Amino acid sequence: MAYLQIAIDGPAGSGKSTVAKEISKRLGITYLDTGAMYRAVTLEALNHKVDLHNPEALKKIVNQMDLNMTVSKLYVNNIDVTDAIRTPEVTRNVSVVSMDAYVRSEMVKMQQKIALGQAVIMDGRDIGTVVLPNATYKFFLVADPTERAKRRLLELKAKGFEATLEALVEEIILRDELDSNREISPLKKAEDAIEVDTTSYTIEEVVVLILDYVKGVRK
Ligand code: CDP
Ligand code: CDP
């Protein structure tokens, strides 16, 4: 039996996870935040103070990690790291860790296993191209970098972190560059993905638009 698979890719702050989470609720299907998995590996690597450019060190980190995800929580070796993976330090370092071949192959294996036995909506950078190349629907969300940085600024301020819009624009552009130009599974729109520019859309508008495609109302 073929299960419904929805792939949502795009750069940082384009709205992927917020929109994917909401769609998963409305359709009653499993949501997987694949970025959270790369963030968890990054957090572990930072906590163990390993060289993030050293493949052997990263391999060790991945092999000693027991990663568990529920609807709203992420655990590494039974420790709740849901908030710890969202710090600016993890965000600044995650793109380097995500370039690593072993890290990627292990994460992709886990993601594909999760999609085997159930309907899913997954968001990330390589879902439509690598993780679920035969997904039922593929979307590629984009938005103007300044708008994406503004969204991030609001989020960070709400969590009590200091940040400026200029620094966040720079950081977002740098992360996009690293994610788009890496050798393995770069951030790239799948040929058969539907591109949605969310710059001037509300979350609800993007959710409705995607659901219209899934329901066949829009083609
Ligand atoms: O939410 P935000 O856009 O900040 O990023 P995220 O989805 O949490 O992903 C964090 C980082 O993980 C990205 O910048 C990528 O470097 C990496 N990532 C990846 O390489 N492949 C994925 N499928 C998901 C995330
Ligand atoms: O997952 P990704 O990094 O693509 O973005 P996100 O974490 O879903 O969204 C980043 C922030 O932008 C969140 O605080 C969302 O509430 C907000 N957002 C928005 O204001 N308008 C949208 N159309 C999409 C997201």
Image (cartoon, rainbow, N blue to C red):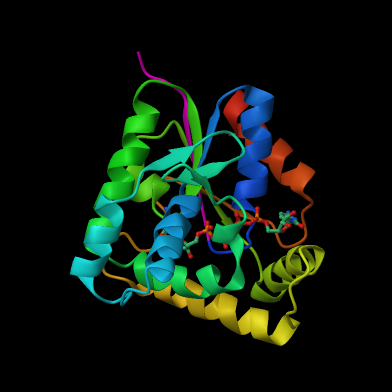
* Pick the front one: 31 or 142: 31
State the image coordinates of residue 70 (x, y, percent, origin top left). Answer: 54, 34
- State whether residue 67 is above or below residue 165: above
- Residue 7 lies in the magenta-colored region: yes
Q: Is residue 8 rendered magenta in the image?
A: yes
Q: Give the image location of residue 61, x and y in percent.
A: 29, 59
Q: In which quarter of the image is residue 87?
A: bottom right
Which segment is the magenta one?
1-10
Query: For the point 50% across and 52% down, which residue is it?
Result: 36
Q: In this view, does 44 lie to the left or right of 9?
A: left
Q: Where is residue 190 in the image (x, y as percent from the top left)?
A: 40, 51
Q: Which residue is drawn at 58% across and 41% down?
A: 73
Quadrant of residue 141 within the rendered picture: bottom right
Is residue 162 visible to the viewer in this orientation of the structure? yes
Left or right, 167 with respect to 8, comes to: right
Nearest the viewer among 213 and 62 is 62
Q: Which residue shows up at 33% across the image and 74% down it?
A: 52
Question: Residue visible at 69% across and 57% down?
Answer: 198
**Residue 187 visible in the picture:** no
- Coordinates of residue 212 in the picture (x, y in percent): 66, 31
Q: In which quarter of the image is the N terminus?
A: top left
Quarter-wise, where is residue 166 in the image? bottom right
